[in-house]
Amino acid sequence: MNSDNHLLLEVALDLANSINTEDRFDRLLSCIRKAIRCDAVALLRLQQQMLIPLAIQGLAADTLGRRFLLSEHPRLAALCNAERVHRFPPDCPLPDPYDGLLLAHSGELPVHSCMGLPLYSDGQLMGLVTIDSMQPDAFHHISDRTLALIAALSAATLKTALELAKLSLHAHQARQLVEELTQEALLKDGGELIGQSASMQALQHDINLVAGSDYTVLILGESGVGKELVARTVHKKSARHRGPLVHLNCAALPETLADAELFGHARGAFTGAERERPGKFLLADGGTIFLDEIGELPLSIQSKLLRVLQRGEIQPVGKDQVQQVNVRIIAATNRDLQLEVQQGRFRADLYHRLSVYPLTVPPLRQRPEDILLLAGYFIEQTRRKLGVRQLKLSPAAAQALQAAVWPGNVRELEHVVSRAALKASGREGRHGILTMQAEDLALTSAAVPVVSTSDDSGMPQALTDLKTATEAFQRQLILQTLAQTNCNWAEAARRLQLDRANLQRLAKRLGISTGRVIQSA
């Protein structure tokens, strides 16, 4: 093996031991100077019509900050137009871009040796290596083959570094996205479960019980009860709390894009897929994914979700290989999934996989003792948003809140408080203590149950207290709905936007038989 081959082998081995991009570039130039005696060497990256120095040796430090436009530097332009190593004659009249920058010489460069190695990858020019010596004909004895091999090693080094930089950027962007998604999920709509009612205490107990496990959780409840808040609480109390929490609303997913959104896609997998993109499951790896409105997920995607639950495997669109993910799944729905299974709109095997540990969030009308607590929480939030000193409820407004049925649950209560506060500030200004009146709530026709005094209603003519009136209204509504559905509890629950089990428990508490014959105690 001749000396040139020894040097090239040394170059390759030294580069293989490089730790990072900067170290790799510096080692490359040191190896080139070891193989070719020279006074200066530089590695430059081509970006459009500009060369950007990535590493230098033997040149002034400020060279790294310079940007060489090809239109202004004919020597560099000539190297970029060359297909292989290009040697300039010692007396070449073209101006040298390094005039006055060589550490071995001050002032304008006299006759000297200069050559360049174009660096190609897949037929595309990536950059240059320039080599200069103060000795004329210093490179005369070096064969083109040796220079071609050095150029190939340099091109491979540059390509590897650029690819690693690209991957690092994508990883950084993915981390940022995960952090943003997690932060958004944790802060959205508040971050605390509020309630002292027995039903909320039971829910808190169940959350504490299941959070420490890695079980899949299915959160059930009507729209607006706070299912997303329950999901965030489970994540925060779990061993995965330092990992990402990624929220995905299945109802907002177009069926054509649901696959790619959940599992990712390769570049060119479909029209508009200009680059590879990780799906929500990959972003949630090591943490939790919250699939809100899971009942809206298309059947075509449900089988793939089942695969994740069974084996932790995802397959991005346009890719043949399968990827493993470690993700805890929390799902939520306001639908009766058992009924959806019976009607063929939801897979039975997926339902059983999801409902390992179901959590049912009670509607607001079943926890009246929590209404003023929640109202106080929303009032304080609204006070800060409006920038007022104090905001409070009048006694009549507090009574109206407690008397309402709240079909929109906690979300409706929040919106009612926000609107009432805005009306109060418009009437009283934003200075001093603002008091929200009952009329600001606008609940009379929207949420307060109107109790008929007619004998035809099936209710007593005189109802002396709120609890009796509320229970009478609930009893009447349930009995009417059961009569309309021929005592089909599943259908009645769907119409009332309740979970079937919750409806039957409420019916028993109200003295309504849950058998086939409707009876009222």
Image: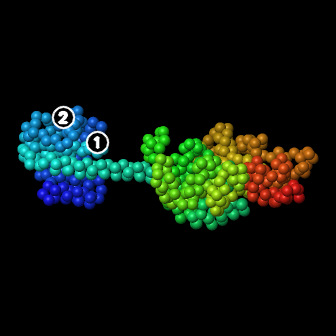
Residue 344 horizontal/vertical position (percent):
69, 50
Q: Nearer the viewer, residue 210 or 433?
A: 210
Report the residue at 51% width, 54% height from top.
314
Compute the Cα span from label 1 to label 2. 22 Å
Report the residue at 11% width, 49% height from top.
142
- The three-letter amino acid code for the residue at tag 1 is Gly
Would residue 300 be seen by someone viewing this image from the given angle? yes
Q: Is residue 115 above or below residue 465?
A: above
Q: Nearer the viewer, residue 325 or 176?
A: 325
- Mark positioned earlier in the residue sequence (1 or 2): 2
Front disc: 1 or 2: 1
Residue 301 horizontal/vertical position (percent):
58, 50
Residue 360 horizontal/vertical position (percent):
69, 58
Would residue 462 be seen by someone viewing this image from the given angle? no
Element assignment for label 1: loop
Q: Are marks 1 and 2 in contact (CB under 8 Å)?
A: no
Decide if residue 488 is on the left or right side of residue 377. Answer: right
Q: Residue furthest top?
A: 71
Residue 391 horizontal/vertical position (percent):
65, 47
Disc 2 crowd, CA 10 A, few/some/many (<14, 14-19, 20+): some
Report the residue at 82% width, 45% height from top.
450
In which quadrant of the rendered image does the C terminus lie?
A: bottom right
Report the residue at 60% width, 52% height from top.
302
List the residue tagged with mark 2.
Answer: 74
List the residue tagged with mark 1.
Answer: 123
- The three-letter amino acid code for the residue at tag 2 is Pro
**Number of numbered discs present?**
2
Element assignment for label 2: helix
In which quadrant of the rendered image does the N terminus lie?
A: bottom left
